[in-house]
Amino acid sequence: MPDTNLSCSVQPDASPPLFLDPHGDVWLGEERLDANLPKLLRKLLRYLWEHRERMVPYNELLDILYGDDMQGRADPWASCDKLVQRLRKKLEPDKPASSPTYIEMLQGEGYVLRNVRT
């Protein structure tokens, strides 16, 4: 079960909107981000992008990310949280984890990708 004591709300600021182009390139405003995302992080970002501005429940993310392999994981929710933390660090390396711009955690429910450009 996800840690319901953790919560991260997206902080309104002057950060540029995030955009994922059809080639999978990540843009922050007009700048292409050279993130070199590993496969699982790309999969996570792609799924959140496809469901942007909508809460994606933990179970849905776990199924997409791990599928049948989830059974062998000691704590799949913690694995999912760590992936999101890694993705946040790639998207905004200078921002504290407690005040993300793009990926919001909804306590015990899931994640929402915000501040996007379509």
Image (cartoon, rainbow, N blue to C red):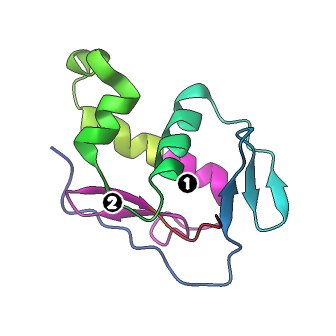
Q: Which residue is mark 1?
A: 88
Q: Residue furthest bottom?
A: 13
With respect to residue 14, does 51 lie above or below? above
- Estimate the x, y position of residue 66 in percent, counting from the top left: 35, 24
**In the rendering, at what x and y percent does residue 52 appear?**
48, 59
Q: Residue at x 20, y 18 (%)?
A: 71
Q: Residues within 10 Å of mark 1 (few under 14, many from 20)?
A: many
Q: Would residue 26 be seen by someone viewing this image from the given angle?
A: yes
In the displayed structure image, the side of residue 85 where residue 80 appears, left or right: left
The secondary element bearing badge 2 is classed as loop
Q: Nearer the viewer, residue 85 or 40?
A: 40
Q: Give the percent coordinates (x, y) of residue 87.
A: 55, 47
Query: Is residue 67 inside the magenta stretch?
Result: no
Going from N to C along the chain, the mark reached first, 1 or 2, is 2
Q: Quadrant of residue 7?
A: bottom left
111 and 82: which is toward the camera: 111
Q: Which residues are magenta?
A: 85-112
Q: Is residue 94 magenta?
A: yes
Question: Callout 2, which amino acid?
Answer: Met
Left/right placement of residue 100 relative to residue 76 reads right
